[in-house]
Image (cartoon, grey):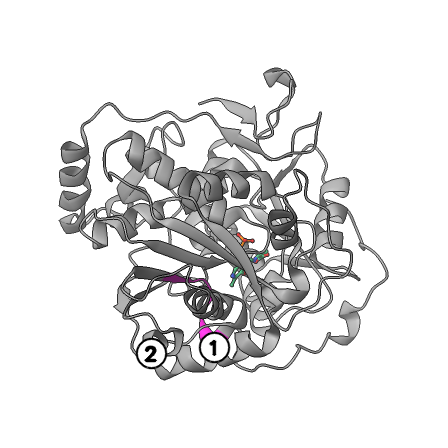
Amino acid sequence: MQLRCSKPCSVETSRLREDRVCPECGAPLELVPERPTASAAELRALWSERRSSIEPADRSGVWRFRELLAGLTENVNDIVTLGEGNTPVLRGLATGRFAGVNDLYIKHLGWNPTGSFKDLGMTAAVTRAAVRGAKFVACASTGNTAASMAAYAVRAGLKARVFLPQSVASAKVAQAEAYGAELVRVGGNFDDALAGMLEGADESTYVLNSLNPFRVAGQKTFTVELMEQLGWKAPDVIALPGGNLGNVSAVGVALEDMLALGLIDRVPRVAVIQAEGANPFVRMWQSGASELTPLKDPKTIATAIRIGAPVSWRKAVRALKLTNGTTIDVPDDEIAEARTVIGRDGIGCELGSAAALAGIKRLRASGWIGEQERVICILTGHLLKEPGTTEPKPEPDMVRAKVESGC
Ligand code: F0G
């Protein structure tokens, strides 16, 4: 398995460390694709057969597709799994009417073990950390990564430390605590927490933010699962919320893999939706700029995606270019409205997720999505993560001027 800089720059490979950004240019690293030699038909048959297995590695919706996780682990007994993946694709009823899309489906990645899509990447990256002999793992998080990392780390016997910005939904903090992680409270936003964590992370700390390419590798499998659920017929559009842009990057990698392997014959257009007050990627895309300018003070009720300096923007650009995709932003009131409608479908989600549906409605209104097109709305976090629409109150001791301690 080989790493490279995702920019790419001229850094020497020997200087790369898999859980850090490129030491030369600061871009996240990526894995050089290593694809199986089996045919598309053989892969489909193998993945389908594993559904009836009783082995945890076969039942996991991530590791069932392990031919696409080349070299991640040689031994299935090493796998750290909580039975992630296998989330259904559901017809959008009230949501379809709301968005004006007849053929709308929802894939809810919030129905994963810790209630968010993060589990898909975390099972892969924690497995990797454990195989590499790491003892300490760390992440900065708007809450979901923290909860997920804490759960997988504790199962693997790793010590977890999570760096949290000032406003985080209390249910997410409660999860990280319940799974025994050490909480470091950071004054400021996610970007401050990530910068502080990376600065303080010593040699022995294995970083599990989505800059870690094994997170992206595990994360990509949901798009494969989705295509399998759709009979290997690509839909017209996949829409998902964007914050740090790891998830859209993973969708892009999955589509590249599936095209190369002949599992699908065309790619859906991918739409990334940001909140209006936390939209650095949309600004860059719409202005035609070739570099992302971070947003200093991102603001939105959707705290999960309140991010001003998304680390994976380059990979996200690649995903949109590959798919003839787009990115738009939506205001908070539309996010809240969309969340209510998703609840009326008997599904529900946290605010950050609902941005996807609000975006689909706008893209339909603008004509980017056609009335008869098949659209998949990706939801990312469970309703119970954040049941209300009000700003979470910072806990008294969460308001601190700076990172309390390094790693
Ligand atoms: N939806 C939810 C529920 C999230 O928690 C996040 C990110 C996103 C969407 C955006 O995904 O960053 O891959 O573009 N949450 C991170 C966290 C930042 O720390 O939990 P992205």
Crowding around mark 1 (Cα neighbors within 10 Å: few <14, some 14 to 19, many 20+) is: many
Question: Element under label 1?
Answer: helix
Horizontal side, residue 42 vs residue 133: left or right? left
Please say if 49 is above or below 110: above
Res 376 → quadrant: bottom left
Residue 126 visible: no
Q: Is residue 189 above or below residue 66?
A: below
- Pick the residue in front: 103 or 163: 103
Q: Is residue 24 covered in magenta?
A: no
Q: CA distance from mark 1 to mark 2?
A: 14 Å
Give the x, y percent position of residue 44.
Answer: 17, 40
> In the rendered structure, which disc, 1 or 2, sits on the residue that comes first in sequence?
2
Which residue is drawn at the image coordinates 43% and 41% (left, top)? 252
The percent position of residue 224, horizontal first and vertical second, equals 30, 45
- Label 2: few (<14), some or many (≥20) within 10 Å? some
Please indicate whether residue 201 sits to the left or right of residue 276 in the image.
right
Please identify the quadrant where the N terminus is shown: top left
Residue 372, which numbered label?
Answer: none
Segment tinted magenta in the rendering: 377-384
Three-letter code for the amino acid on which mark 1 is drawn: Arg
Query: Could you say which is closer to the camera, residue 154 or residue 164?
Result: 164
Vertical order, 273 against 46 (above or below)? below
143 or 388: which is nearer to us? 388
The reply, left or right, for residue 199 in relation to residue 341 is right
Figure check: 288 above or below 373: above
Residue 381 inside the magenta-drawn segment: yes
Name the mark on residue 97.
Answer: 2
Q: Nearer the viewer, residue 394 or 92?
A: 92
| Residue in view at x 74 percent, y 55 percent | 295
Q: Nearer the viewer, mark 1 or mark 2?
A: 2
Q: Where does the image place residue 215, in percent across and percent down from the top left? A: 49, 43
